[in-house]
């Protein structure tokens, strides 16, 4: 597809992972995350194996590890809570580097950190190897409610249009000498947001009119039907199946 | 369905319409557009041009009893049971291409109309390619519409409608917001199409360039109907309907290349 179609998370390349049909990849990531979450937290080595599995996928997808690690930073605000747990969770205390931390809290933090990071890493890999448009087609194929897919696809299409409208309104405000400097100016900003909402709403009506004029009756016509062969499903299933094996071993050992 | 050459592309007779808030926009419009004709629909702001356009494919009116009069497209009356076919036959290109192009890529957008009509697979692909080819945008098929220039988006908007192989192409302000080069390119494209065109415009030189016939819609009725050149030279009619030529433009001095 065209180069201009790329979103920031997508990394254009040719690889076996890029070429897998989107719905196979979606299903694989979903199953992988389920398996990871179902793993007992005491099986520390299992999470290491999961990380290795993901590293192998990243290698096959030609996604540089630096890229992957940078994208993982998105997780930081969410794990802040996990870092608090050793301090606030009641339970037996253990001394670590001179700090007295709660043992259940440490396990809880590890649990969230490990499972969260693996889940985010798998999603980042999915996003890096699948175009946004293909993801939507995949979701449609996986019988996601069509209305939700339509809403998501309109968000992609009109995100830039609305941002541009917002930018023009800001320039118009500033051209008349306005700069937001504090609480006193929030009223103006709120009114701008309201105006933007009305404009977007009206655009929605005009778009609907244009759709109806071209024969829209409430369902999107199928233009690209994504299909997958048995071999492609098998390839995609390799990740969750390997993870499942690790998970089952983990349960039998603990 | 068999059609003789004499069946006009568009027949509007006695069309009157009032909006639910009571504002009456059309007071009995009669208009016939023969097959293959290019007609400009002129008129001041608020004359009812858009209201008329939305009747042509049954967005307004459409046999739900809210208006009187009738619209026929290639002989087919615009009524509720016929709406799907009418909307395939009447291709409306709206003024803002961002409203018209709502799919993530150009190709999918052009495919939307034919796919909604049930076309699939290779036939659909071919139809999309042919339509984009006719507006010179075949190389942009996989691009998202918001990454195109305004003129390119307008051309794609025309292609989305051409892909439905319409009986009549209705353009709402086709030259608005276009730079002179894009404006000329669009004119070349429109001239190259062998399709009936109804063009709503304030751009009188553009009407003169493209349309042999013009009608003036004013106060909800067709106030004048005739060859574009004659209409634009009729100063009394022009003044009566708030139509003005651009500064320095004299329709008498234009030598038409046709």
Image: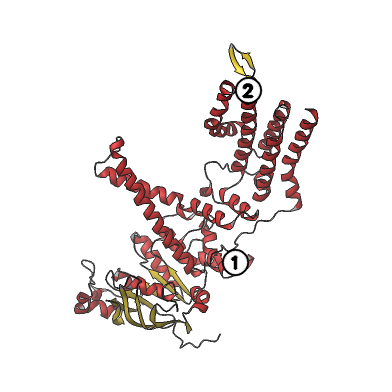
Place of residue A92 in the rendered image (x, y in percent of width and height, measured from the top left): 64, 18
Image position, residue B160 (x, y; %): 49, 65
| Displayed quadrant of residue B129 | bottom right
Task: Please tell me in which quadrant of the rendered image residue A199 appears.
Answer: bottom left
In this orientation, which residue lies closer to the viewer: B107 or A204?
A204
Q: Secondary structure at mark 1?
A: helix
Q: What secondary structure is found at the residue carrying circle 2?
A: helix
Do labels 1 and 2 touch, CB within 8 Å?
A: no
Q: Position of residue A33 (x, y in %)?
A: 67, 39
Foreground tag (1 vs 2): 2
Give the side of residue B154 with respect to residue A229, left or right: left
Q: Which residue is mark 1?
A: B124
Quick check: do tags 1 and 2 share a chain? no
Question: Quick one: A179 or A157, which is closer to the camera?
Answer: A179
Q: Residues within 10 Å of mark 1 (few under 14, many from 20)?
A: some
Residue depicted at x 55% and y 68%: B114
The answer, for residue B236, to whether it is visible in the render is yes
Label of residue B63 in the image: none
Q: Is residue A138 left or right of residue B26?
A: right
Q: Which residue is mark 2?
A: A106
Q: Residues within 10 Å of mark 2 (few under 14, many from 20)?
A: some
Q: Tally the marks.
A: 2
Q: Residue at x 60, y 12 (%)?
A: A97
Q: Residue furthest right?
A: A252
């Amino acid at each position: 597809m065209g180069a201009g179609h790329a979103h920031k998370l997508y990394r254009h390349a040719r690889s076996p992972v890029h070429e897998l049909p989107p719905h196979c990849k979606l299903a694989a990531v979903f199953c992988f995350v389920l398996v990871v979450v179902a793993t007992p937290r005491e099986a520390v080595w299992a999470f290491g194996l999961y990380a290795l599995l993901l590293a192998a996928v990243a290698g096959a997808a030609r996604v540089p590890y630096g890229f992957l690690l940078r994208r993982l930073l998105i997780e930081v605000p969410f794990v802040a809570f996990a870092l608090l747990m050793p301090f606030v969770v009641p339970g037996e205390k253990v001394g670590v580097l001179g700090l007295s931390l709660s043992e259940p809290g440490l396990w809880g933090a590890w649990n969230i950190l490990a499972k969260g990071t693996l889940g985010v890493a798998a999603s980042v890999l999915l996003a890096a190897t699948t175009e946004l448009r293909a993801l939507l087609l995949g979701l449609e194929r996986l019988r996601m409610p069509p209305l939700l897919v339509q809403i998501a696809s309109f968000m992609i299409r009109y995100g830039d249009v609305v941002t541009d409208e917002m930018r023009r309104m800001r320039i118009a405000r500033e051209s008349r000498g306005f700069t937001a400097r504090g609480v006193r100016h929030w009223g103006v900003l709120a009114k701008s947001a309201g105006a933007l909402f009305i404009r977007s709403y009206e655009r929605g009506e005009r778009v609907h009119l244009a759709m109806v004029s071209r024969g829209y009756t409430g369902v999107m016509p199928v233009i690209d039907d994504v299909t997958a062969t048995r071999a492609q499903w098998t390839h995609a299933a390799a990740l969750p199946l390997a993870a499942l094996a690790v998970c089952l071993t983990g349960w039998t050992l603990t | 369905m068999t059609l003789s050459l004499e069946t006009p592309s568009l027949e509007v007779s006695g069309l009157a319409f009032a909006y639910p808030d009571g504002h009456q926009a059309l007071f009995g419009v009669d208009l016939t557009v023969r097959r293959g004709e290019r007609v400009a629909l002129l008129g001041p702001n608020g004359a009812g041009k858009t209201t008329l356009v939305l009747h042509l494919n049954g967005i307004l009116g459409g046999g739900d009893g809210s208006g009187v009069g009738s619209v026929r497209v290639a002989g087919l009356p615009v009524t509720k049971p016929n709406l799907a076919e009418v909307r395939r036959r009447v291709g409306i290109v709206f003024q803002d291409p961002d409203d018209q192009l709502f799919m993530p890529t150009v190709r999918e957008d052009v495919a939307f109309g034919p796919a909604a009509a049930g076309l699939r697979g290779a036939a659909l692909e071919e139809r999309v390619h042919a339509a984009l080819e006719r507006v010179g945008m075949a190389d942009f098929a996989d691009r998202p519409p918001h990454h195109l220039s305004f003129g390119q988006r307008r051309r794609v908007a025309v292609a989305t409608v051409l892909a439905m192989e319409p009986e009549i192409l209705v353009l709402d302000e086709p030259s608005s917001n276009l730079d002179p080069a894009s404006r000329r390119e669009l004119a070349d494209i429109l001239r190259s199409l062998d399709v009936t065109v109804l063009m709503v415009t304030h751009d009188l030189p553009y009407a003169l360039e493209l349309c042999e016939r013009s009608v003036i819609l004013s106060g909800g009725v067709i106030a004048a109907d005739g060859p574009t050149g004659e209409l634009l030279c009729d100063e009394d009619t022009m003044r009566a309907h708030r139509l003005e030529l651009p500064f320095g433009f004299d329709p008498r001095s234009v030598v038409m290349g046709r």
